[in-house]
């Protein structure tokens, strides 16, 4: 994830995708209103931080309201980013079995 006005990326993990936004796990909190760009599986998503909640230690869940996503003109976040979540979900199912 790149933060507007700052150099270098912040490594995040994609946790959840909806039709209007996404949730990531990050090692640092970011203030609401911060503009960000996230790249995942060849898709570039731009949006605004809506919240950051501390989960444990230095780990935060951050909600991003997406205003643009580009992949061959497709704007359906679930369709274009949902497949990135499938391997993680399968790993969780195997652990709980």
Image (cartoon, helix red, strand yellow):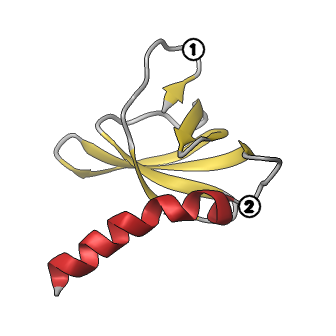
Residue matched to label 1: 5
Residue 48 is situated, as x and y percent measured from the top left of the image, at 63, 39
Question: Considering only vertical position in the picture, is 8 above or below 71?
Answer: above
Q: Outermost residue toward the right?
A: 73
The mark tally for this picture is: 2
Say which residue appears at 52% left-offset and 25% top-offset: 3
Say which residue appears at 58% left-offset and 57% top-offset: 81
Q: Secondary structure at mark 1?
A: loop
User: Which quadrant would the C terminus be assigned to in this image?
Assistant: bottom left
Residue matched to label 2: 76
Say which residue appears at 68% left-offset and 48% top-offset: 66
Residue 50 is situated, as x and y percent measured from the top left of the image, at 57, 47
Say which residue appears at 51% left-offset and 26% top-offset: 2
Cα separation, mark 2 vs mark 1, equals 27 Å
Q: Few, some or many C-alpha atoms within 10 Å of disc 2 (few <14, some 14-19, many ≥20)?
A: some
Residue 29 is situated, as x and y percent measured from the top left of the image, at 37, 36
Q: Nearer the viewer, residue 92 or 87?
A: 87
Q: Secondary structure at mark 2?
A: loop
Position of residue 54 in the picture relative to residue 96 (left or right): right
Position of residue 93 in the picture relative to residue 78 (left or right): left
Question: Considering only vertical position in the picture, is 44 above or below 81?
Answer: above
Residue 44 is situated, as x and y percent measured from the top left of the image, at 64, 38
Q: Nearer the viewer, residue 24 or 84?
A: 84
- Mark 2 or mark 1, earlier in chain: 1
Q: Outermost residue toward the bottom?
A: 97
Q: Few, some or many C-alpha atoms within 10 Å of disc 1 (few <14, some 14-19, many ≥20)?
A: few
């Amino acid at each position: 994830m790149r933060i507007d006005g700052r150099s270098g990326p912040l490594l995040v993990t994609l946790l959840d995708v909806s039709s209007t936004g996404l949730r990531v796990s990050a090692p640092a909190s970011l203030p609401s209103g911060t503009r960000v760009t996230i790249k995942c599986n060849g898709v570039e998503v731009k949006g605004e931080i809506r919240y950051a909640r501390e989960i444990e230690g230095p780990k935060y869940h951050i909600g991003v309201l997406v205003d643009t996503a580009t992949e061959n003109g497709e704007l359906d976040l679930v369709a274009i980013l949902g497949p990135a979540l499938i391997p993680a979900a399968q790993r969780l199912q195997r652990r709980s079995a």
